[in-house]
Image (cartoon, helix red, strand yellow):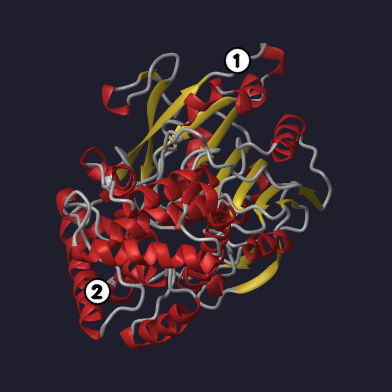
Amino acid sequence: HGIAFHRCPRAEALAAPITCGKVSVPLDYAHPRGKHVSLTVSRIRATGPKARRQGALIYNPGGPGASSMAFPEYAAEDAFRRVAAAYDFVGYAPRGVGRSAPLSCQRPSAYAKAPTSSPPHPTAAFKRRLVARARAYVRGCVRRSGRALAHYTTLNNARDLEVLRAALGERRLTFVGASYGTYYGAVYATLFPGRVRRMVFDSVVNPAPGRIWYRDNLDQSLAFERRWRDWRRWVARHHTVYHLGATADRVLASYDTARRRLAGKPAGGVVGTAQLQSAFLRTGYNDAYWDPAARALAAYLRGDPEPLIELAAPDPAEAADDENGNAVYTAVECNDAPWPRAWATWDRDNTALARRAPFETWDNVAMNLPCAFWPLKPGRPLDVGNLEAVGPRPRKTGRVTVPPVLLLSAERDAATPYAGAKELWHRLPGSSLVTERKAGTHGLWGGPNDCVNRHVDTYLLTGKTPGRSAFCAPRPEPAPLPEPAPLPESGKQPAAIPGTP
């Protein structure tokens, strides 16, 4: 079945020449003739002459829970022009996301409730509330999503991608995945190695079965601490601009002062300590936030809360999308793999980690804790890069043979630490790893590093990789701006769309 593309529905906010369609996938691949759900798809045709066209390029920005419906809009931007001349840019909302059989676990207004608090070293009472909230959240997922809940998994995302490839009429798949998109792209390559044409894995999740997902999240909290220090050092170097402290520790003291004040009196009635933390977490995702975050903190401490409110207040217009994205994130991560069931394990591991990495540890716990109380039987993560004889006792039957694929990673990436890229690189023997040295922005393709973009263009246009590995000098460090910068579009989890946080 092909996809019938038409004018996009108003809800997608995508203008011509982008068109939209739907692809139908089985809710449960064990029963392909049973219930189906439809995924929304968007497309813009390649701009170059027919003779140079290379088919469809499908993009996924990760999450789990992010949509790439807006991806075709990027075809018009300079960084993507060469690739957009050769490929149709295809975006889609994975199962559960947006208008693709959307999942929900609570009322969006309840999800977006603000202000809320987020202590770096929570008390026993706060931890009890955390556990109660996680249990209530799980009950909401079960109540609002029912029996379908079990079928939101990485394996099914990979199978859906295979259906999408076939529906687009592509003999083999050309795919760019960022962040979580690298994980289910790698799972796809393991399940369907003969269907891979070219794949780019941008900011790579560590796919080792023992790390999905509990350990990956611990690794992430530790890496965010390092990136948070990078930001504070940068602010300290520009003390004459921001006056937040001439050392990283003094900058931290300024941040802590703001945190204490907000705990007593939320800014604008909506920015509490949790909103502050999640706004400043973005500095760990993308350098574009470095200057706006420093400015907002400086202004707030001088008595002007407006820039901080603009930076950190939740946008009610985004509440439904945010709640939906979080529900999909939770379902996929909880279904994919076993998690510790005992709160004592979480408490022990994260209390120890928070001594070294207080910035993000307990917020990451809050986000993932529903998995401790998840009522469904978890899956067993696929051993990426290895064929398995499926059965009651899976056994390895050798390496998967995949055409050369391209991996991109920044050495100081916090959301998907660099070790994950090296892990996938070892698991896919023909792969090529492009490293952006001394940089930490999450999501490299289409950003300001021309060296990285050239490697991606060359690979997508010709299939050539730069050998087993290549290194790019870091992008220029941000400069304090004379005028406040417009805020990039944002969100935790994960690199949204190429070149943005």
> Percent position (x, y) of residue 107?
15, 52
> Percent position (x, y) of residue 3?
43, 26
Give the residue pinned by disc 1.
Answer: 47
> Percent position (x, y) of residue 178?
55, 47
Give the residue pinned by disc 2.
Answer: 130
Q: In this view, does 120 lie above or below 309?
A: below
User: In the picture provided, is 205 more to the left or to the right than 274?
Assistant: right
Residue 495 shows in this picture? no
Q: Which of marks 1 and 2 is nearer the N terminus?
A: 1
Q: Which amino acid does label 2 sit on?
A: Leu
> Percent position (x, y) of residue 229?
54, 64
Residue drawn at (59%, 69%) of the image: 208
- Which of the 4 image quadrants contains residue 6? top left
User: In the picture provided, is 115 more to the left or to the right than 212?
Assistant: left
Residue drawn at (52%, 60%) of the image: 232
Q: Which amino acid does label 1 sit on?
A: Thr
